[in-house]
Amino acid sequence: MVDFAGWDMPVQYAGVVAEHEAVRTAAGMFDVSHMGEIEFRGEGALESANALITNDLGKAADGQAVYAGLLNHQGGFVDDVVAYRFSPEHVLICVNASNREKDFAWMTENTPRVQPVNRSDDFAQLAIQGPKAASMVQTLTDLPLESIATYRFREGAVAGVPCIVSRTGYTGEDGFELYCPPDRAERLWNALLEAGQAAGLVPAGLGARDTLRTEMKYALYGNDIDDAHTPLEAGLGWIVKWDKGEFVGRPALAEQKAAGVKRKLVGFEMREPGIPRHGYPLGKDGQPVGEVTSGTQGPTVKKAIGIGYVPTALASEGTPLEVDIRGRPVRAQVVKTPFKR
Amino acid sequence: MADNPKNLRYTKDHEWARRDGAGVVVGVTSHAQEALGDVVYVELPKVGDTMTAGSPFGVVESTKAVSELFAPISGKVTKVNSALTDEPAKINSDPYGAGWIVEVQPSDPSQLDGLMDADGYNDLLAKTAT
C-alpha cells in the first residue's frame, strides 16, 4: 500500500504486469474511490459548469459525459476532469483526488452563478475495465448496457447497489466506472469479483492503472499536465471547444493559439536499452530540450515508452531524441500515439 | 516469508552473496524482488569493472520503480548474467538461482564474514515488517 493524496492505495495485488494483461485481455477492477465529485444543481447549473471547463456540455446530451480541462487564467490546467450532464439543472464533475479542495475553491471563486457542492465523500468509485467488463457487469444489472455508448451513462442498480453506470475509463479498454454510496462499495466490489472471476476478472492497483494509461498516452495530472501547461501544449486541443463562448482561461489560450504553441507533449520509444522516467532530461544532439513527464516499460507494447514536452520543431514523428538516463544519453525517437493500437 | 537459503550471506540492502570456488556470486533476495514487483530492466556492470562494498554497481527497474544494486563486497566483476537482459523477470521467478546478477573476484574474501547469515537476515525482515 502507498499513500496517494492521503489515501491508502494498493500499488498492486497479484503484480503489475499480470493485472495489466488481465485488463487488456479479460478485465480488471480498480478501486478509485479517491476521485472527487463536485456537483452543480438548480437553474443555471449547466451554464455555470460550462463556463469553467474547456469542453462543451451545451452540445452534450443528457446522459453524456465530456472530458475537459479546468483552466486557470493563464490557460494552464487546474485539473483535467470528466463532466457528467444529467440535465441542464444537474451536472457532476469528477476530479482528481489530489485536486479536490483546490478545484472546489477554484470553481466556487469563478462560477458565474450556481455555487458548486463538494460531494466527494458521498461517492465511492469502482472502475471495471477490459473487453469482458460489459458482459460481467451485465450479469448484475437490469440496465441494458448495450444502450450505453462510450462516454454515456445511466443510473441504475448493480448488484442491488444504486450506481451511476458510466462507460468511461483510463485504460484504453472498454469498461465502466461505477459511482456508488461509499457504504455499499464493498458489497459492489465483492459482487463484481464473484461475477467476473471465472471469466478472468482480477483486482488491479495503481501500478497497472499507470502502465495502462501510459500506453494510451492519457495524461496524468501532476506528471504530464499541471498549472503551467495548457491543453494546446498537451496535445489536447480536441477538448477545447472554441465555438462554445467564454470559459475560464479562454483568452490566454486564444493568445497562445495565435502566437503558435512553442512546446508539445510527445510520445517516444527508446531505441536503446533503458527506461525513461518522470523527471529525466530530454536532449537533442547533446543539448537539453525538455523533460520526461511519464515513462515505463509497456507490458502490452513490450517496449520502453515515454511522454514528455519538447519544442514544437522536435515534435514530429520520427524525430530522434536522447533521454538522459542517470547521466547517460540513451537514444529515443518520437512516435505516433497511442503507443498501444 | 520466503525461504532464504542457509548457505548465503545477506546485506541490509537485500542483496545476497554466495562463495563459489574463488569467486562470489551476487544477487537480490526474494524479499527484494517481491518489494520491487515485476522486474522489467536490469543495468549490469561490465566484466572487469571494480565494485566497492556498499556502493552501487547496477540498477534494477520494475514497472514502477528504479532501484540501485549495492555491492555486498569489494572486488572485480568476472561474470555477468547477461540472460537477464532479455529475461529480467528471472529475478522474480528465481532470485537465488537463474536470477543471479554478477560474479565477483573478491579483493578481501573475509568481507563475506561481516555480512548477515540467513538467521540474521530473517530477523532483519521480521523487524522491518512490524
Image (cartoon, rainbow, N blue to C red):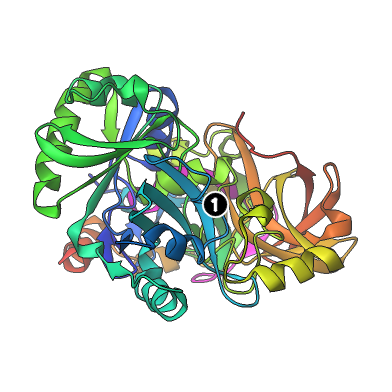
Measured as percent of width and height from the top left, residue A47 is found at: 46, 61
Q: Quadrant of residue A169?
A: top left
Answer left or right for B63 relative to A242: left
Q: Is residue A308 left or right of residue A130?
A: right
Q: Residue at x 52, y 39 (%)?
A: B88
For this orientation, the residue located farthest to the front is A43
At label 1, which amino acid type do we have? Asp
The residue identified by callout 1 is A56
Q: Given the image, what chain letter belongs to the residue carrying mark 1? A: A
**Residue in view at x 43 percent, y 44 percent:** A65
A66 or B48, nearer to the observer: A66
Instruction: Tell which of B106 and A95 is nearer to you.
Output: A95
Q: Is residue B38 magenta?
A: yes
Whether residue B24 is visible to the viewer of this picture, yes or no, is no
Residue at the image point whose x is 53% and y is 55% from the top: A68
- Say which residue appears at 63% left-offset and 74% top-offset: A228
Badge 1: how crowded within 10 Å, few (<14), some, or many (20+)? many
Q: x, y percentage for residue A104?
A: 37, 73
- Marker count (numbered): 1
Residue B17 image position (x, y, % from top left): 42, 54
Q: Give A45 or A32, whichever is nearer the viewer.
A: A45
Side of B4 where B39 appears, left or right: right
Residue A334, image x, y percentages: 78, 46
Label 1, secondary structure: give it: loop
Q: If the image is split into quadrants, where does the C terminus of chain A sit?
A: top right
- The residue segment tinted magenta is B34-55
Q: Is residue A326 visible?
A: yes
